């Protein structure tokens, strides 16, 4: 649900999963055949996992991080893992890169540049996101929603960003 001021988008679990399903349909309808899904952790893990299951393709993971401060609301220095975790040795062939959103576009641009320069066995690379913001400097190949107002997206699992084990335990103590 987008707030009236256009500054916040609140997404329920049901909406979130529906959007991932719509992303899968967009990729499928394109007719593009790929060998592996590479998700960017953390935001791309849930969409990557579901797409991996739907398309019956192996899931590789590359860890990236830039939103750590202020409970994940402040973008900082981009850190990218030096290695990709994949069940099939080295990542190769046609790769679908999956993340949750193209916010500024910085992460996706840097990762794609790194993949093209450092992973020569990748023969073709396309990107898929749930949301692409209008301010993004990067345009993904597949996106479900284009958000021209640049809202802050409140994903359904963000409550865990400010929760610690003691708070979780207190929630479940009977």
Image (cartoon, rainbow, N blue to C red):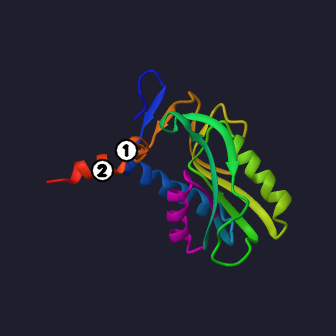
The magenta region covers 38-57
What is the spatial separation of the Cα atoms under label 2 and label 1, in whole angstroms? 7 Å
Residue 61 lies in the magenta stretch: no
Q: Are marks 2 and 1 in contact (CB under 8 Å)?
A: yes
- Residue 140 visible in the picture: no
Q: Residue at x 65, y 72 (%)?
A: 86
Mark 2: secondary structure: helix
Residue 71 lies, in percent from the top left, at 48, 37
Q: Using residue 29 as the reference point, say whether residue 9 is left or right of it.
A: left
Whether residue 43 appears in this view of the structure is yes
Query: Can you give x and y, in whole percent of width and height, for residue 93 in the image?
Result: 76, 71
Quadrant in which the N terminus appears: top left
Instruction: Specify the quadrant of the image occupied by residue 9.
Output: top left
Image disc number at residue 168: 2
Is residue 44 highlighted in magenta?
A: yes
Question: Which residue lies under the disc numbered 1?
Answer: 163
* Secondary structure category for the residue under label 1: loop
């Amino acid at each position: 649900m987008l707030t009236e001021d256009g500054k916040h988008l609140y997404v329920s679990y049901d909406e979130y999963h529906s959007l991932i399903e719509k992303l899968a349909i967009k990729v499928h309808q394109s007719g593009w055949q790929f060998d592996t899904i590479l998700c960017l952790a953390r935001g791309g893990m849930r969409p990557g996992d579901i797409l991996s299951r739907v398309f019956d393709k192996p899931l590789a993971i590359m860890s990236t991080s830039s939103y750590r401060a202020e409970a994940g609301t402040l973008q900082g220095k981009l850190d990218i893992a030096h290695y990709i975790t994949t069940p099939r040795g080295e990542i190769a062939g046609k790769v679908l890169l999956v993340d949750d959103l193209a916010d500024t576009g910085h992460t996706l641009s840097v990762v794609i540049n790194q993949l093209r320069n450092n992973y020569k066995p990748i023969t073709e690379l396309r990107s898929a996101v749930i949301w692409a913001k209008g301010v993004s400097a990067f345009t993904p190949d597949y996106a479900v929603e284009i958000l021209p107002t640049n809202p802050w997206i409140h994903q359904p699992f963000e409550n865990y960003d400010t929760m610690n084990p003691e708070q979780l335990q207190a929630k479940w103590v009977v």
